[in-house]
Image: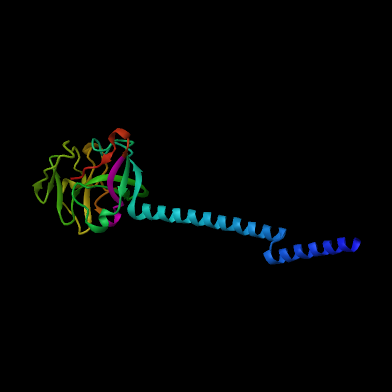
Amino acid sequence: MEDFEKKNDGSLDDRVSEQSQETGKSPKGKKEVKKKSVGREILSFVGYIAVILVITFLIVRFVGVRTEVIGTSMTPTLQDGDNLIVEKVSYYFTDPQRYDIIVFPYPEDPGKHYIKRIIGLPGETVQIIDGYVYIDGELLDEHYGNAVMENAGLAGEPIVLGDDEYFVLGDNRNNSEDSRYPAVGNIKRSQISGRAWLRIWPLDKIGFLQHQ
């Protein structure tokens, strides 16, 4: 009887040992598999975050960015506190046009951006006479800035724009620091960050901006 029990015990031990070898599983092995699984999850998460950051960077750098209007230099078109999407795609394929509303860094403080409307195009001669804009000697027929300008600034004398220069004004002509002033001056093509495209705030004014 004792021999039978010992034999059975030995056989059972042998079978358990054989099964362990076949499956390759052990308590230690399970811990290693779990650690590897957690490691893969962490790497996957880090990779996901990296992809999101890259996509965000590309959108901000090449497609568009949200910006907020501060001040009243573009009233009545834009109001203080308006939130806009500024798109950058258009100017990869076409040149800026007259009346486009553009964003550009303030020359004396690149961290600060201005938003103005293009009035003069490359190669044109711009002058303000008696409060009105003249392009190449002809009165500009426009309706964005109807106020008679009290200060012609630099444009009191003819300004000849270079091949890559633009003359910009705020729609609120008597309350705008723009190309009439030395601190801003003519804006080069390379300075233009993008074109104001969509107003997303306030909610009752959501919509695409009209430029022409």
Q: Quadrant of residue 188?
A: bottom left
Judge by depth and name the residue closer to the eye, 64 or 175: 64
Would you place residue 144 above or below residue 29 in this image? above
Relative image position of residue 124 (x, y in whole percent): 15, 54
x 31%, y 45%: residue:
114
Q: Quadrant of residue 144?
A: top left
Q: Is residue 181 magenta?
A: no
For the view shown, which residue lies furthest in the right direction? Answer: 2
Q: Quadrant of residue 69?
A: top left
Would you place residue 184 above or below residue 44 in this image? above
For the view shown, which residue lies furthest in the front direction? Answer: 1
Looking at the rendered image, the quarter that the C terminus falls into is: top left
Judge by depth and name the residue closer to the eye, 158 or 111: 111
Relative image position of residue 129 (x, y in whole percent): 12, 43
x 27%, y 46%: residue:
197
Judge by depth and name the residue closer to the eye, 137 or 140: 140
Relative image position of residue 134 (x, y in whole percent): 12, 46
For the view shown, which residue lies furthest in the left direction? Answer: 138
Scheme of image coloration: rainbow
Would you place residue 159 above or below residue 204 in this image? below
Q: Is residue 4 left or right of residue 56?
A: right
Relative image position of residue 119 (x, y in whole percent): 18, 47
x 50%, y 57%: residue:
47
What is the count of numbered marks?
Answer: 0
x 80%, y 64%: residue:
11
Looking at the rendered image, the quarter that the N terminus falls into is: bottom right
Magenta span: 189-199
Q: Is residue 194 magenta?
A: yes
